[in-house]
Image (spheres, grey):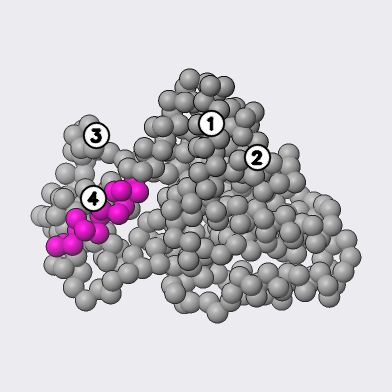
Amino acid sequence: MRQLIFALTAGVLLATTPSAIAQTVGFADAIKILAASCGKDIESHCKSATLANNEIMQCLEKNQAKVSQKCNADRVTVVALIQERLAAQAAAPKICERDAAQYCKGVKPGAGHILRCLLKAQPSVSQKCNTAIDLAGYR
Amino acid sequence: MTRILLAAVSAALLAVSASGATAQTKLSRNEIINSLQGAQQEVELSADELQKAALENIEKYPGANAPQSLPLADKLASLRQFNVEITFDFDSARIKPESYETVGLIADALHTPYLQGQTFFIVGHTDAKGAREYNLELSLKRAIAVREALVTTFRVPGDTLFAVGLGEEQLRDPSDPDAAVNRRVQLINLGYR
C-alpha cells in the first residue's frame, strides 16, 4: 500500500513537471500535424499518393519547392516523431527485462502478455521500466 | 465526397451518447481499446470466408438491395468491435488528410499491450447507393488502404490485420439503406492467435 501511494504521488509529480524527461507522442498526434500543416499541399500536389508505403512523404519531398514552408518543416518533424515512438516501443521490452523476470515469472512471452503484466505491476516495477512503458505509449 | 461513416461504438456507448451531450465527443485511443479488448476466444473465421459469403449473398439474392443480411451476421455481431468514420476521395480508396488522425488513433490502440497479439478484421462498408458488386469492390479496396496505412506508416504487425469489404451487404441501418450511418469502417477482434 505504501508503495502504491508513493507511485501515485510520483505520477502526480511527473504530470506537473513534464519537461523533466524526454517524451514521445502517439501516432495520431504526430500524423495530425502532417494533416494540419500539409493537408492543402497534399490535396493539390499529391492527389494520386496514399498514406501508405511512404507515398505522401515522398510526394511532398519531390514537390518541396511548391509546398508551404511550414509543411516542409513539419513533414520532417512528423517523420522524426513517428520514428521516436517506434524506437521507444522497440526498446521497452529490453529495458523492462529485469522487471519482467522479477514480477512476471511464468507469464508466457509474446502477444503482449508480459507487457500487460508489467502494466498491472506498475507500483512495484522499476522507474526505468515504467518510464520506458510511458514513452512507448503503452499505458 | 464519398464518406465511410464510422459513427461510433458498442451498444453500451451508443446508449450513453443517445442521452445527448457526448454524441460529439472526439474519438479517443482508449475508446477504441475499450471497445475492442476482451475477446473471449479465437474465432474460426477467415477473411476469405467472410469475403466469399458477401459475394455469395449477391449471387444468391440478386437485386438492387440485399434482401437479407449475411448468414454470418449474428456471429460477427457477437464479437468485440468498433466502428469508425474514415473519409476517402469520391469513388476511391485514397484516405483524405482529415482522416489521418483517426488512422493514427487506431494504430496507437493496436500497438498497446491491451490489443497486442490479437487478430483483427478491418471491414469496409458502404451505403446502398449504386451497384452491389461495385460497392463490394470499393469497400474492399478501402479496407485494404486502411490496413496498408496501419502496416506501413505506423508499423502495426501485418500478420494481425485482415481486410474485408462487405459493400452494402451488412447495413447498419437496414430501414434506411442510403443513410450515412451505413458508411463505416469496422474493426472486429478475432481473438488471440
Pair 2/3: label in front: 2
Q: Closest to the observer: B43 or B89?
A: B89
Residue type at mark 4?
A: Ala
- For the residues marked 3 and 4, what is the alpha-carbon distance in whole angstroms? 15 Å
Q: Earlier in the sequence, mark 2 or mark 3?
A: 3
Q: Residue at x 55, y 54 (%)?
A: B148
Is disc 4 placed on a helix, strand or loop? Answer: helix
Residue B86 sits above or below residue B38 on the image: above
Q: Earlier in the sequence, mark 2 or mark 4?
A: 2
The residue to which callout 1 is attached is A62
Q: Chain of mark 3?
A: A
Label total for image: 4
Q: Extreme right residue here?
A: B63
Residue type at mark 3?
A: Pro
The residue to which callout 3 is attached is A18
Would residue B84 be visible to someone looking at this image? yes
The residue to which callout 4 is attached is A132
Residue type at mark 1?
A: Lys
Q: Are marks 3 and 1 on the same chain?
A: yes
Q: Chain of mark 1?
A: A
Q: Earlier in the sequence, mark 1 or mark 2?
A: 2
Q: Is residue A89 magenta?
A: yes
Q: Earlier in the sequence, mark 1 or mark 4?
A: 1
Give residue A75's position: percent from left, percent from top.
Answer: 45, 31
Q: Which residues are magenta?
A: A85-99
The local crowd at label 4, few if under 14, some if 14 to 19, many if 20 or more residues have their Cα within 10 Å, is: many
Is disc 3 placed on a helix, strand or loop? Answer: helix
- For the residues marked 3 and 1, what is the alpha-carbon distance in whole angstroms? 37 Å
Q: Are marks 2 and 3 on the same chain?
A: yes
